[in-house]
Image (cartoon, rainbow, N blue to C red):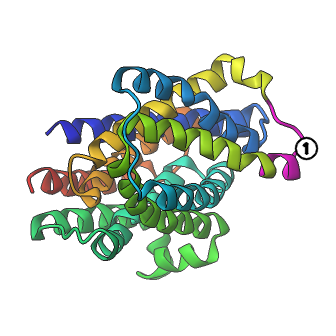
Amino acid sequence: MLWALAAFVASFSWATADLISKHLMNHRGENRYHTLWARFIASNIPMGIALWFQGVPHIGPNFWWAYPTVIVGDTVASIFYITALQEAPISLTVPLLSSAPLFMLLTSSVILREFPSVRGSLGVILVVTGAYLLNLHMAKGGVLMPLKELVRSKASRLVMGAAFIFSIDTAFGKMVLQSTNVAFFGLTYCLGMGVAMLPVLLYKTGTVPVKKLATPSFFALGILFGTGIVSFLYAMGETNIAYVSGVGRLSMVIAVLYGKFFFKEQHISQRIAGSLVILCGVVLILLH
């Protein structure tokens, strides 16, 4: 069950990294692309420490084609996500990523030939149902209104697009992990994402904020994000990626609480109710 603990650590680390990111963008006026780039570059510190202990592995053949696929896809998905995080409440943005496990059921079955058990599948479905309940206030205009809002809202479309891309890239990411080890993949992933973001930074802002990496906020952001990556990759290497993603959705519960206490966001009671449904789903996933 160590994979479950690792997945929870990842969810906590990423939710807290999102909290810091939103604070930097919305309350301190930091550029979204600078913030996203810093998440990956500063993450190389925990990645490097992990590689020091784990060592450089033999690199399998799948690495050379699956790795660039992950980098390209995750760069696009990360830009989608950071944009939505800046423009929409954190208690909505993070929960919408819960759609990833549903996509994962399809992508992991097709790409990796991994088929969740009935109990595990039910757990993932409950996680997604909980996300619907988190947005229940939108149902005042009709039961399908929360789903229609996904189409009408730019932020929702961006998050759903990010969730879909992440679900595909996670499957390819496991291929990369199977060709290396957790630390090496984590380090090359963060370096690759940082390099891939450079053309975006130069095009959108004309600057590369190297000096900001030394500030406490950006440093903490990178440490948390990197810790999440190490934990998630470890869990992903131990069990079915659909289950890992399901437990990782606990980040939405944490994000709802962050939204209440740090940003005074609304509709918290119904989102807590949705969180309880999510927890039931996570229990089923853990008991598979």
Asked whether 253 or 119 is in front, the reply is 119
Q: Position of residue 30 (x, y in %)?
A: 77, 36
**Measuring 41% from the left and 66% from the top, which residue is drawn there?**
136
Q: Position of residue 42 (x, y in %)?
A: 61, 28
Report if residue 249 is visible in the image: no
**Measuring 35% from the left and 55% from the top, which residue is drawn there?**
174
* The C terminus: image quadrant: bottom left
**Measuring 55% from the left and 47% from the top, which residue is drawn there?**
90
Asked whether 253 or 100 is in front, the reply is 100
Asked whether 92 or 160 is in front, the reply is 160
For this orientation, the residue located farthest to the right is 206
> Which of the 4 quarters of the picture holds residue 253?
top left
Classify residue 249 as left or right of residue 114: right
The image shows residue 56, relative to residue 110, as above or below, that is above
> Which of the 4 quarters of the picture holds residue 101?
bottom left
Classify residue 19 as left or right of residue 95: right
The image shows residue 139, relative to residue 170, as above or below, that is below
Residue where numbered disc 1 is placed:
206
Q: Position of residue 208 (x, y in %)?
A: 82, 35
Classify residue 42 as left or right of residue 171: right
Q: Amino acid at mark 1?
A: Gly
Over which residues does the magenta segment extend? 200-209
Q: Position of residue 125 (x, y in %)?
A: 25, 68
**Measuring 80% from the left and 46% from the top, which residue is drawn there?**
201
Asked whether 274 or 241 is in front, the reply is 241
Q: Secondary structure at mark 1?
A: loop
**Mark 1 crowdedness (10 Å alpha carbons): few <14, some 14-19, many ≥20:** few
Classify residue 118 as left or right of residue 247: left
